[in-house]
Image (cartoon, rainbow, N blue to C red):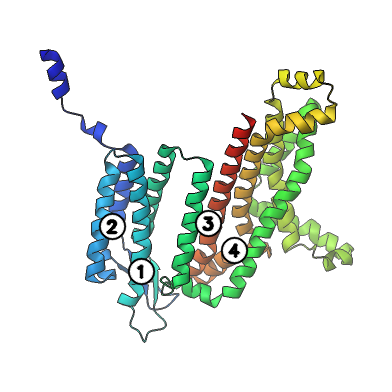
Amino acid sequence: MTDASQTAAAPVPLSARLDRVGVVVALIAIVGMDWQPFATLKPNRLVSGQGLGLGSALPTFWAAIGIGILSLATILAVLRTGARLRLATGIVSLLMLALLIGLVPAHVVPPDNSFARVSPGAGFWLMALAFAVLTTDAIAKLKLGPLARLLLLAAAIAATALILGSGHWDGLSILKEYATNADKFWREGRQHILLAVASLAAAIVVGLPLGIACHRHATLRGVTLPVLNIIQTVPSMAMYGLMIVPLGLFAASFPIAAQLGIRGIGTAPALIALFLYSLLPVVANTVVGLAEVRRSVVEAAEGMGMTKHQRLMQVELPLALPVILTGIRIVLVQNIGLVTIAALIGGGGFGTFVFQGIGQAATDLVLLGAVPTIALAFTAAVLLDAVIELTERRRL
């Protein structure tokens, strides 16, 4: 009895009461809150600015509320609490950051000054990263299904659209860059999506049959996959550069090709380069997915009198679909990022703003291209992850 009571009264070790991910989140949040500027005030869009902490960037009332809520969220992140509380903490913290950063311009910029610019500082980005990690970790611990994750994504998009539509962020420099480039922004956005999706579609049309052929013929597989691996190792800048000379010569030899838009620079070389990068994941995942189909299942289909084509379309491909979709997910997320580099050869897309901003030393113009690219890639990943999981459930 004495031993049992002593065991029950033993103190819980500190490490057992702390969340490991939460400790990392808290450290990042503390650095962002205490040692990095929350916002940057610049005389104009090009000149380096002055860093402002939470206390000086905001009215006293909002600074106190912000510091209090973010500090409480940091403490909750460290403690080993329930996943639902951690999710709520992460979401509330991100919303608080979104609210606070929109209040900065009205507080620090005089009403008659149209040149001054306010940008989120390193502290804001660090805290946003910390609480985004906390939110993601909570979602993983809750083991939410695909539909629940899609609802959270829809809620995040709706909240962002609501804030943008309300004008709360209009005083920020990135929104001023958008106001200047609004028509161009949506044009380049359409081009960005077109290049990513069109190259993926072409890779599916070519890569899926090629993957099926590689699965059935070992000799073809032994040649095709190494070649595609070599293509995948070529740096994107070099790949785009390699497209310029042959397509330029082709356009010079066949003027009709130039009239159709096939030139050494522009959409054509970007599309071809993205298509080549897309082939390996599609082909390799098709081969792996078909190889994972149990032989007994194929033999049962044979016993039912199915032809080779029927077995492929009705049995093998449906069972291999989750693995094939994983390859497609890899390609789409990869291509959304690679399209950014295509702007260097006139391919268009959000990379246009990135490289213009670098050339002009305008950080917020760089962000105007980088932030939507990241948002597109994240959205595509969540959507396709949900589709893959739903497909796997149907297969089971």
**Which comes sooner in the sequence, label 2 or label 3?**
2
Mark 2 to mark 3: distance in Å?
Answer: 24 Å
Residues at marks 4 and 1, CA–CA distance in whole angstroms: 24 Å
Please tell me which residue is depicted at 47% across the width and 75% down the height of the picture. Answer: 176
Q: For the point 33% across and 50% down, which residue is it?
A: 89
For this view, does 10 lie left or right of residue 171? left
Q: Name the residue under label 3.
A: 375
SS under mark 2: helix
- Give the residue pinned by disc 1: 40
Q: Which residue has dot 2 on it?
A: 33
Q: Nearer the viewer, mark 1 or mark 2?
A: 2
Residue 298 placed where, x, y %?
75, 22
Q: Which of 6 and 67 is in front in this view?
A: 6
Amino acid marked by disc 2: Met
Please give the name of the residue rendered at 29% of the width and 47% of the height, measured from the top-left corner: 27
Amino acid type of the residue that numbered disc 4 sits on in the rendered structure: Phe
Which residue is at a point 24% across and 35% down the rendered structure image? 17
Q: In this view, does 45 lie to the left or right of 123?
A: right
- 234 lies left or right of 219: left
Q: State the CA–CA distance, disc 2 to disc 4.
A: 31 Å
Question: Is any part of residue 193 visible from this angle?
Answer: yes
Q: Which amino acid does label 1 sit on?
A: Thr
Q: Position of residue 306 (x, y in %)?
A: 83, 25
**CB of mark 3 within 8 Å of CB of mark 4?**
no
Q: Do the residues labelled 4 and 1 touch (CB within 8 Å)?
A: no
Circle 2/circle 3 CB separation < 8 Å = no
> Crowdedness of circle 2 by 10 Å Cα count: few (<14), some, many (20+)?
many
